[in-house]
Amino acid sequence: MHLIWLRTDLRLHDNTALAAACQRGPVAAVYLVTPEQWLAHDDAPCKVDFWLRNLQHLSQALGPLNIPLLIRHAADWDQVPAVLSQLCRELAVESVHVNEEYGIHESRRDAAVAETLEAGGVTFHSYLDQLLFQPGSVLTKTGTYFQVFSQFRKVCYARLHSALPRRVATPKAQAALTLKSDPIPEQVDGFEPPSDTLRALWPAGEDEARRRLDAFADQQISYYKDERDFPAKPGTSQLSAYLAAGVVSPRQCLHAALQTNQGEFESGDIGAITWINELLWREFYKHILVGYPRVSRHRAFRPETEALAWRDAPEDLAAWQQARTGLPIIDAAMRQLLETGWMHNRLRMVVAMFLTKNLLIDWREGERFFMRHLIDGDLAANNGGWQWSSSTGTDSAPYFRIFSPLSQSEKFDGEGVFIKRWLPELATLNKKEVHNPQALGGLFGVADYPRSIVDLKKSRERALAAFRNLPSRQEVAEHE
């Protein structure tokens, strides 16, 4: 018997570890419910619910192949080696197969599992699956991990030219086993199930992920570059939750994009090129996790920014979290997050810059809040995005480039359609007034909308001063 341990790879098709396990003989699959670990990692209740719903679909898909899906429980990852070795003894398992994961805790967990299993005579095999390139294989000329995306992308392009990552064949049915699948839990203690409305926005299963990918590639990808920054338009693929849970693979995404662009990723359809770049950004941030493990430890990528004098401002933080900052584009974006488990990417940058620059609140507060609410929460992408916006990260926005929420709002939601969708209390305002109701004073119609909690101009100056006072990178390096 061979075992595939499923994690963030909840799919039947193009699943490297599953295909490899099935080539060795009879296979069972196992998924571990680890609620205390999920709480420690700030996983959102809507994301845990999404995992469980996708497991239901996967169990049904594995059924006709006679691959049982087992559920086991471990409070946290420290207990995983014992739980898995017990299961291997029960089933007389010869080998365990996993697709690699990349945070520092994930790497330590897998190393501990491998050591325990191998001591008991069970071999442990891990595979490249959720990335196109193995971390450590895309390096600078001096053999270090890239810190600048454009340079990383250039090497990725060269690698793609020489060899495209190939999709993996779907396993065929195996002989029936006496082992039966376990029921999938409908919820996990500590994770309140989301509303039916939120669930309906994110149907589970590979068929839905494939439908979204095909529809995007067929109908929308060509407009992606032009429309992806406008939150009122359906300009994005809406695949991030499926990628984060591994319901669709980056290889499937890459091949779908290439198919619409005659196999090209550097020329041709600008929309397809831009979307492939986004896949590579996702890749870049996962490589950063491996190359610079401090970002998995709540540390700034740029050590000199650890000295920033962040404000301790609980009331401002609460206003931001609760969508009552008095700046409509910020509040509309935060309501979208709270109600749907997702936020438009342009707005993720806008609200992150507002929190870290205008409110001068530590980026880690925002990173944590996002993880606790995002259905597509992913350590690498979320951390990378927050550190980029707060100018503490790799290849980040220079500290003096601070988005103005008002100009971003006017530029990307000019008619106020997105704002009015999420802030119906501003529905009576015209397209000029809706971006900054405070300019109207306490006029009728917006009496129940708060005044802005911050002066944008003064707060911008405060942020610039805080960053100017930092020691240089060299000074920090000399003291370490």
Image (spheres, helix red, strand yellow):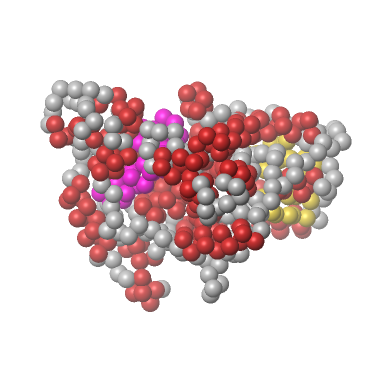
**81 displayed left or right of 459:** right
The percent position of residue 80, horizontal first and vertical second, equals 66, 48
Reply yes or no: does residue 358 show up in magenta.
yes
One can see residue 18 in this view = yes
Residue at 38% across, 77% down: 478
Q: Quadrant of the C terminus?
A: bottom left
Quarter of the figure with residue 315: top left
* 301 displayed left or right of 329: right
Predominant secondary structure, magenta span: helix
- Is residue 238 at least partly visible in the picture? no
* Pick the front one: 323 or 183: 323
Pick the front one: 122 or 376 = 376
Percent position of residue 231, x then y: 38, 36
Residue 259: image location, x then y, percent? 61, 44
Magenta residues (range): 333-359
Q: Is residue 296 above or below residue 372?
A: below
Residue drawn at x 28%, y 52% is: 402
Residue 471 sits in quarter: bottom left
Residue at the location (74% across, 54% down)? 124
**Residue sitting at 80 percent across and 44 percent down?**
22
Q: Position of residue 309 (x, y in %)?
A: 27, 58
Query: For the N terminus, which image quadrant?
Result: top right
Residue positioned most to the right? 175
